[in-house]
Amino acid sequence: AWVDLRSVSEAPPLTLARGATVAGVVQDERGLALAGARVVLSVPSLSTRAASAGDETRSVLSGDDGRFEVAGIAGSASRVVVTVRARGFLPLRRVVDLGSSAKLVLALARAEGEVSGLVVDERGLPLADATVSARIGGVAVSASSSSAGRFTLEGVGRRGVLVVEARKDGFAAFRKQVRAGERAVMMRLERLQSLHLVLVDHRTGAAVTRARVAIDGAAARHVTATTAQGALLLRAARGQHRLTIQAPGYARTVARVRVDDGPLPTRERIELKAAGSVSGIVTDSNGQPLAGARVSAGGVSTRSANDGTFTLGGIAEGHHALVVERGSAHHTAGVSVLAGQTTGPLRVQLGN
């Protein structure tokens, strides 16, 4: 069976046999064969063993008749990612579930249209060697800015809105929505400033020597402090930022800081509250365990297990409202949490 995968979001789902050869043809939008297209099949979320065997990525070129064949798909894989690139055409990316046999028709749209503009710093001076990118058909299209800061992204289409991103070492990334065809896009990058944090215990003032800090909720932008003084140096653009701090034995802390522009680092001292935990069991009015009840206290939440039990960890010491909900049933009670200790086990009964 042949399944048509065109460069549109309505492409149908398809399946391929486990361990079977994946074959197909690359065409343009008129159905004419495209020779020399690069077809890459990758298997996501492989085990270490599979990855070491080299099964995670296979790459071939389509022949003169546009046909390609990739053998030896990992037998343990449940899906593959197919990416196709050809000069002068928009890239195509599709996720294919493994199941019944099928052949692929990969139809590429011609790469028409472009977006161009200028990359500058906060003073308006051009920035060279910045990477400017956008995602088309699930695949990144990128270009580097010239010595004059100019860039051109080709093959982004003539219609629609896309998100363009600019990055350069030492600067905060900048994203902007633009329309395909725009030729005067201004990408303004701000230099990263230094932020000096000191983390201490709110009771004793002792240094917190190990912590994980995320900036503005970005999981990739984190650091771990290991100095004896609980100090760490971050890099962030000037302005307001939201820090999420997690440290062993302490409650999750959210702090807002303002980073200033200047030769000296912005300094902030942040106090962390020691944490304890709450445990218990949720039952119905007949005393039978209730699974899936939402339990929350002190900004931490979980759901009761199949046997009705729950444990809430990382709660700041102090008095909190313990809220238990399941469907229309609701229960609230006060609970005291001590640092390094577990309050409970509590028994929470929900009515019908």
Image (spheres, rainbow, N blue to C red):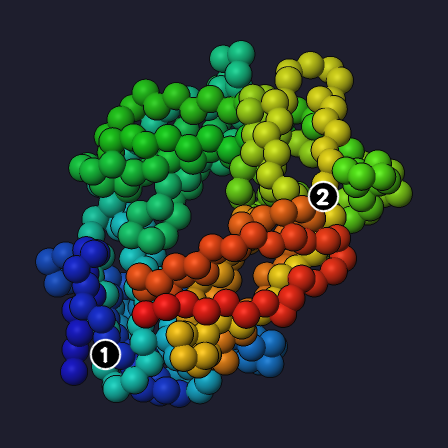
Residue 242, relative to residue 44: is it above or below? above
Amino acid type for the residue under numbered disc 2: Lys
Kindly tell me whether residue 277 is visible in this rendering: yes
Q: CA distance from mark 2 to mark 1?
A: 59 Å
Quickly name the residue at label 1: 103
Q: What residue is shown at x 28% (from left), y 42% (from top)? A: 155
Provide residue 320's location: percent of width, then percent of height: 58, 48
Quickly name the residue at label 2: 273
Q: What residue is shown at x 50% (from left), y 80% (from top)? A: 307
- Residue 64, quarter of picture: bottom left
Residue 263, relative to residue 286: is it above or below? above
Residue found farthest to the right: 228
Amino acid type for the residue under numbered disc 1: Lys
Tell me if 286 is positioned left or right of 131 in this view: left
Q: Nearer the viewer, residue 102 or 234?
A: 234
Residue found farthest to the left: 30
